[in-house]
Image (tube, grey):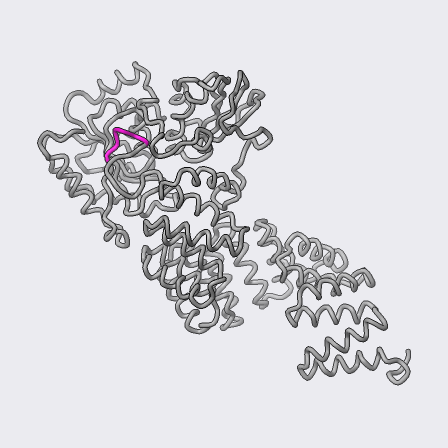
Amino acid sequence: MPDSLSDPAASWHAAAVAAWQRGALTEAIGLLEQVVAVRPDPAALANLGALLRRAGRAEAAVDVLRQAVAAGPDRAEPVCNLASALCDLRRWPEALAAADAALRVRPGMPEALLNRATALVALHRAAEAEAAARAALTQRGDWPEAWLQLGAALLAQQRATEAIDAYRTVLRHAPTHLAAQINLGVALGRAGRLEEAAAVLRATAAQAPDRPEPLLNLGGILRGLGRLEEAAAAQERLVARDPAYWPAWSNLGAIRHDQGEPEKAVAAWRRSLALHPDQPDAQYGCALSLLMAGDFAAGWDALECRWAATQHRGRARHRGLPLWSGEALEGATILLHAEEGLGDSIQFARYVPLVAVRGGRVVLETYAPLARLFAGLDGVDRLVVAGDPLPQATWHCPLQSLPRAFGTRRETIPATVPYLCVPQDAAARWQARLGEGRTVGLVWAGNPTHGKDAERSIPFAALAPLWTVPGLRWVSLQVGARAADAAGSPVRDLSPWLDDLVETAAAICALDLVIAVDTAVAHLAGALGRPVWLLLPATPDWRWGLEGETSGWYPSVRLFRQPRADAAARRWDTVLARVREALTTRGAVW
């Protein structure tokens, strides 16, 4: 082996090691660059790549580490370091491939397992990420970074309580670990422990005032608590400090939407997207804000981005067919299909007869609970339930894309009702079951898994003032676990007979009035042209707009809106007082 006097590369390498040991990173990198220029051996290249990554020069590190891997393909460390550098650059598929290559050279290598877990979390393959993180922890049980990735994998699988434990484990081993503190706050929020989450994130923001992530996530938690002014203020502090910090602009868009300020929301969403266009959730949020603002011309087009958003990811179907955008059908078969909840399907089913008028053969694919109800829609040549074999078709169109295909604007909403009908025998059966007398049906709670359920649903006890209105009989159209809320009250429970939406529709047709929160039953009553009073939170879903007592979608709906001042407390007493007054007003039209 040549000594350092006769071999300059060896001398430079030794000097680089000495420079690195005394903390002179830039000097060490410069010396190693001289080494590899003379002798690009695997060890020198690997060391240079590792130091470049440590210096924050990830792109340069990747280039050098690829050379190291090519020069020494049987060495695990360079390819593992390559995976780390690719993780730094968020080049997740390449990072995963490099981590797997390192594991082929050295099975069970903990650093490679950590890189694998990190990449898999980012690629939305959470179960595999969990397995990789746990494998790393079997070898290094006190490794904070492996616990951190385990927490991320658990959180991605909606296992927030387990993720909280993982993040607390990180903090036992590394009490000042900033990412663990932030993620603990996020996990507490996902577990519904919002006040705890806010406390953790406030403390973290105080400890790291120069880092944006604590305030960013605090804004999301405060939004969940309904403390929208505080949430907005936290994001405004961030964008005042750094106007190019796009995540805060996205958060601000969501908060402004919840505040019922859709124009401000759109401006914030667009600012964020201009800074960082690859944000499917921000694109979807902006589309909903445009629709809430009544800008249907831009809103319907923007809504086509929804398939990439988290809420819709993996739900796109029939993409092998061209999307129908209003073209003449000329006898061609078109597949129309449900995509969202039952209420959305009912709302947009009004377009099905209009599609048939365009001269095609309409196949309607729907959910099983809607099949009998939609069988009576005009213009349907064939009805199928999702999952059943489908006939060949030339076009497809999700129901929520139909307003775009027809160029719907607020003034051109096809609002002729009823567009759904009830079999005569079912209607007669329910008329006989309910008998004579002024009867009002109630729905007070929606789907508990809905992201806005806490704002939309009403505690049953809050309805008690309505029972004192004389001359009325009360029945419950509520189904599911919340139907039991009415036990012991004057409200008759109809849920044992409401086994599908045809039965619910028939019951509605036998009632004088339906009073409901924003659920499929409200859409159903509106589509049947029956009187329905809809109880709305301060910032309702986009389709109900922000002002007025009437709906452009359903002429028979009367809107009772929660005052904006009640939004944070989610109070319903003022809404229900207005409902009670309307019920007792002489000559009131239902």
Question: Which stretch did the figure color magenta?
Answer: 553-558
Name the spot of residue 515 as percent of width and height, x first: 23, 34
- Seen in the picture, residue 368 relative to 37 is either above or below; the reply is above
Residue at screen point 64% across, 64% down:
139
Q: Give how far across and how far down residue 273 sits, in percent.
A: 50, 52
**Quadrant in which residue 67 is drawn:** bottom right
In this rendering, position of residue 122 left or right of residue 466: right
Picture quadrant where residue 65 is located? bottom right
Q: Relative to 580, is 571 on the left or the right?
A: right
Relative to residue 102, is residue 218 drawn left or right?
left
Q: Main secondary structure of the magenta part?
A: loop
Give percent across and percent down for residue 137: 61, 62
- Reply above or below: 498 against 538: above
Image quadrant holding the C terminus, namely top left
* Residue 555 within the magenta-colored segment of the rendering: yes
Lateral position of residue 184 relative to residue 38, left or right: left
- Which is nearer the eye, 517 or 481? 517
Q: How many numbered marks does the figure carry?
A: 0
Q: Name the residue nearer the viewer: 28 or 552.
A: 552
Query: Which residue is rendered at x = 66% and y = 62% of the image?
Result: 84
